[in-house]
Amino acid sequence: MKRLPVMLPFRLQPQVGLIDRSSGGGLFVWQTGLLLLVALIGSVATAQAQAVAAQASVLSLLLKWTPLLAQGFLFNLAISFMAMLLGTAAGVVLGLARVSLLAPVRGTSWLVVQFFRNAPWLVLLFFVMFLMPFEFKIGQHTIPFPDWIKSTIGLALPIMANIAEIVRGAVQSIPSAQWEAARSLAFNRRQILWQIILPQCIKRMLPSWMNWYAILTMATTLASIVGVSEVMTTVGHITAAESRTDFLIPIYSYVLLWFFIYCYPIACYTRRLEARFAER
């Protein structure tokens, strides 16, 4: 019997995340980590070959300053945690405004999202640093407003806009039949969003959310430009204290390897989540 051609069921392809090779995500592959490690070893060997016999070895200097570098790196991670938390909370609200039934709310949220998505991160940092006060006076008390908090806010703004687009896309990806079924059960729009739609959106948003966290972690080094004492500022102080030009490339390669070691597991887990959710 001749078999008639049939159409196979349509399967949605997983969205390409920022860690995908086709979109520049090749940075977070093990080959990149190996290349960074080779670059670090090569730079240490080259610097040691150029060093004067009376000078301390480059490797001993890296070990000597590692505790101080670790303190600066932990401060970068703290900034990334707080900026991601703040940006996610604001982004969810802004993303829900993007799917509002009110045209003025949708239009205003669209303008906010487009502005902060396309504005350079460093420019936003400078705007926040210089537009926000350095201290607040409440009665007879003066409360300082440190630079690292303003940097956290500045980094949270572009994250907010991108999370808003992730939320909007996830909400609109839910089949409209679920909205209609919920309305038939007398759910109002707020109940449908918070009890039915958003719980299903979590697994759709999680891989992209993790991608943006990895990007934000690397972007925290921008805070050094506006005077925040994080790992890159610490590197500058160390190189000034040592006054050795041959120490520059090894210490920067060392710090770069730290960032890769921290972000690589996030990228791997994100790939695993994308593959798992694509199969369902």
Image: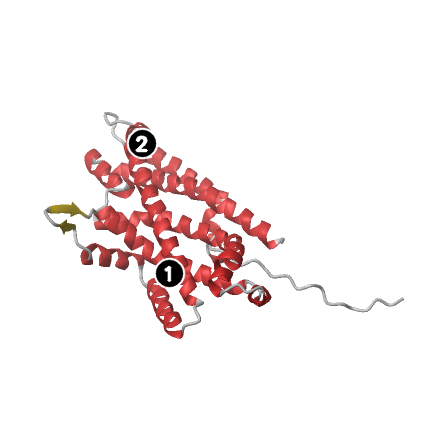
The residue furthest bottom is 103
Q: Give percent across and percent down for residue 238.
A: 23, 36
- Crowding around mark 1 (Cα neighbors within 10 Å: few <14, some 14 to 19, many 20+) is many
The tag on residue 161 is 1
Q: Amino acid at mark 1?
A: Ala
The C terminus lies in which quarter of the figure? Answer: bottom right
- Is 244 displayed left or right of 7 in the figure? left
Q: Is residue 143 above or below residue 5?
A: above
| x and y percentages locating residue 224 in the rendered image | 25, 47
Q: Is residue 204 left or right of residue 95?
A: right
Res 51 quadrant in image = top left
Horizontal side of 147 relative to 177 (left or right) equals left
Residue under the image location 16 percent in, 46 percent down: 143
| CA separation in Å, label 2 and label 1 | 36 Å
**Residue type at numbered disc 2:** Thr
Residue 170 seen in the current view? no
**Disc 2: which residue:** 66
Comes first in the chain, label 2 or label 1? 2
Q: Is residue 94 visible?
A: yes
Q: Position of residue 176 (x, y in %)?
A: 57, 67
